[in-house]
Structure formats: structure tokens, C-alpha cells
Image (cartoon, rainbow, N blue to C red):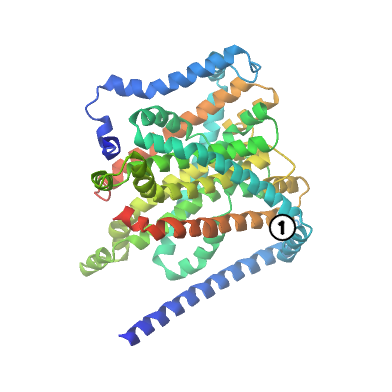
Amino acid sequence: MTDTALSLGDIAQGEPHWRVVWRNVFPFLVVGAIWEIVAHLGTFPPRLFPSIETIAAAFWRLTVAGILPHHAFDTLLRLGAGFALAAIVGIAIGIAMGRSRRAEDIFLPLVSIGAPIPGIAYAPLFLLWFGLGNTSTILLVAFVSAFPIIFNAWTGVKAVKDIWVRSAQAMGADDPRLFRHVILPGALPYILTGLRLGLAQAWRILVGVEMLAAVPWGLGWMIFGAREFLNMDVMLAGVAVIAIIGLALEKLVFQRLENYTVVRWGMMT
Amino acid sequence: MSDALRISDKLRMSDTWRSWSRAAVTLLAAAVLYEALARSGWFAPALMPTLPKVGGTLWGVLIDGSMIGHAAATLYRVLFGLALAVVAGLPLGILMGRFRAGENFILPLASALMPIPSLAWVPVFILWFGLGNTVAILIVFYAALFPMLLNAWAGVRAVNPLWLRAAGAMGADEQAMFWKVIIPGASPFIITGLRQAFLRAWIAVVGAEMLAASDFGLGWVIFDAKEFLNADLMLASLAVIGAIGFLFERLVFGSLERATVLRWGMVRAAKG
């Protein structure tokens, strides 16, 4: 019973470093061992169920040949381009909706109708309108990740405490200063949450869109193309790279960003 | 007092009415703009069909029953996969919340698998299980599992320790503690998890149907329509997909929430 009463914080405390590492590695060792046993048992054809050393060899071969980095680089480029587009447009629309009643009346119905349709469902339509390749992929990623960004920026501006705005005005702040020093910092926790959700959304959709859009390079296309040749080792190496990129996005980009801004300004603890 | 109340009521009424009318004006303007673009002849009519044409197509496929069949196939896959995810994710999440060993084992695996988009598994699953229903259901399962698992875990951990001790002091045994305190206490999180799981599943099923071309399902209809340049059919199925997603989100989960956590007063209790 005491287990449930413990808070998250005290798990990490009072434990030597090596035990923490071991605890995190142990489950992977167990799963890896089971995978190896099944792979070597020969119940499934090795072509479809390769052993871990085959996957690692494929990973190494493709990395040394520069194929895997090229695929990963192109995927990241698309993610960055689409997400940047969504961030600029989304934050602008969201803040406009929060500040002006007219913008809210115009955009809210459009956003509420577009948001519940899964982004990937638009993919064939975008392919038809903008052709196969990069343009459709980037536009679709931007379109999909814009929704959470708009919603959160809008909520964030609305959630800025009225008393802050009024006291800033009483102290003689003009509109640009009010915006820069009160509204923007006040809405920032929400905007960051929106960016985070938007990036996660973009990442989830991008791999699938790459499979549909037949782009020449990209991790999604690599996995999908390898299927034709039954190259399961290449496919699983690709999935591993996707997992690494996804983890890195979460740990390196967003937790850092949050620490540098919101926590430092005391907006969130 | 009552006068003031009535006035504020009236104000609120006119406010809602105003935002509805504004919404209607916006949508009408968007529709007119689209219609003008579609009729201007700048774009091929096959790529940008007029709204009456889209409406006619939607009506046609609804009447002849083909769209209903596709929607039923998609819903079957989503609900099957979601049910599997609940059956697997809920007990595992509760296990993680209750026992340190469970948490130590499952959490690292879950955090490594979670950042992989479910659609990345589609080609792998196609090779393992062949084209068809199995792939779509498993992709839905993968997409829905993690929100379910993590929310159940967070919910069990967030149960107020005071309630546990109070129940213990009043002589509740393990079983009563579990069913009467921990499960209701974790329920707001579990329902949130179910909601998120459905949203993820709804995205995953459409993508899986496009990639793992089986012969039925809304995603397959859209993808197939692309081959024949049937933009009107694509827009009609988009409308159906949006409508079903919206209905589930609002009606099913909304009423589920009202019938359980809101009625038990859990939402306020969890916040306070």
C-alpha cells in the first residue's frame, strides 16, 4: 500500500547510478533474449524474423554507406520545414484569435471543422492537388500540426490574467509593450504545449505520408520500399532509427526549451 | 436580483446566438469562396468538384449503402483494436501503478516504443500478417495501447493517499480497496486515456487502411478514389470520417464521462 503513496520524485533519489541504469536496461535484455531465442528457433522464416545481429549488421552497413543518414536527414528536413510553417502560421492565427473578437469569429468555425478529421485522411487529396513528392508532404505536415498550435495559442492568450493586463496598462504600457512583456510571456506555457503537441502530431503523420507520397528519400519510404524485397532487417533498422529520432525530439528539443524559458521565468515549476 | 439574472441570461443567449450566426456567416463565406474557385475553371473540375457535386456523391453513396458498409468495416477495426488495447493496457497500467517491479519493467519498454509512430509498423505488419483486417486491427491496437497504459498508470498513482489510509482505517480489505477506492479514484485518468486512445486509433485506422489496401474501409475509399481522380468521392468520405470522429468524441465519450466521473464528482475531486 505504501507503494502507491510514493511520489514520482523519490524514485530517483537515494539510489546509486548503476542501479538506475541497470533497471532501465534489464527489460530490454529480457525482450532481446526472447527475440533471439524465437529468431534462432526457426519457427518463422529468418527472412521475416531476423535475429538482432542481422538487424544490427544491416544498420551498420546502411549507416556506413551513408544511405540511412541520408534517409533520416531528408525526413528531419521535411519535419522541420512543415513544423516551422505550422508554428509561424499557427501561432499568428492563434494569437489573433485570442486578441480580436472578429478573428475568433472567423477562424474558430473553420478550425473546429477541420480538426476532428484525422490528418492522414487528407493525404490523397493533397497528393491530387499538389502532386507526389515534397510539396504535398510538407504542406500536409504543416496543416496537421497547425491545429493543436492554433488551439493552444488561442487558449493561452485568453488565459492571461486580466489583472496583469490591467496593471500593465495602469502603469502606462502601450500596446506593443503590453504584448511583448505581458501577453506573450503569459501565454507562453500554452504556446509551448501547443508546439509540443504539434510536433508530436507532425512526427506521427510524417512517416505514413512518406509511404504514400513516394518521395525519393525518407525513412517512411525506405521502410515501405524494403517491404517489396522482403528486407525485414532493413525495415527494422529503419524503425529503430525512427524510435531514436522520436526519443531525441522529446528529450532534447522540448524538455530543454521548457527549462530555458518557462521554468526560468517562474511561469511553471 | 431576478431582473439582473434575467438580463445576464438574455445577454448570454444573445452571445451564443451571435457566435452561431458569425460561425454560419464564416462557413457560408468559405463555401462561396470555394464554389467560386471551383467554377472559375482555373483548376480541373475533376480535382476541385463543386459543392453540389460533392453533396450529390455523398447522398448517392449513402443511399446505395456502399458508404455505410465501408464505415461499418472501419468502425469494426477501430473498436476491435481499441478493445484489445483496453484489455491489455488497463491491467498493465494498473499493475505498473500498484507494483514497483511492474513499473520498473514496463516503463522503459513503453517509453522506447511510444515515440515510434504506429504507421511505421504498417509495412512490417503487412509482411508478418498479410494484407487485410489483422494489420489494421494491430495498428489500431499499437496506437491505442500507450495512451491507455500511461493514463491508467498515472491514475492509480494519483489516487489520494488520504483516501487509501481512510479506507484502510475503516477496515477495507485489499479487494474492497481496489474496487471501491483505487478504480473510482483512477477513473478520470482512465476515461481521458480512453478518449486519447480513440483519437489515436481513429488516425491510425485511416492510415492503415490506405497503406494495407484491403477492399473495405473509409481510408481505402479515399485512397482508391485518388487512382480514378474522384475528388468528389474523396471529399464525401472525408466528411463521413469527420462526422464519425466528431460523433464519437462528443456523444460517446461525452456521455460516458457524464455517466461516470462527473456523476461521482470525481473530476472536481481530482482537481481539488
Q: Residue furthest bottom?
A: B3
Q: Which residue is mark 1?
A: B48
Chain holding disc 1: B
Q: Who is closer to the viewer here, A163 or B58?
A: B58
Q: Residue furthest left?
A: A171
Rendering quarter of residue B41: bottom right
Is residue A61 among the parts visible in the rendering? Answer: no
Question: In percent of the image, x 27 and y 39: which residue is there?
Answer: A5
> Element at badge 1?
loop
Residue A170 horizontal/vertical position (percent): 21, 69
Residue A80 horizontal/vertical position (percent): 49, 40
Residue type beneath disc 1: Met
Residue B188 horizontal/vertical position (percent): 40, 51
Residue A30 lies left or right of residue A43; in this view the side is left
A63 shown above or below B242: above
Question: In percent of the image, x 32 and y 46: which residue is there?
Answer: B159
Q: Who is closer to the viewer here, A25 or B46?
A: A25
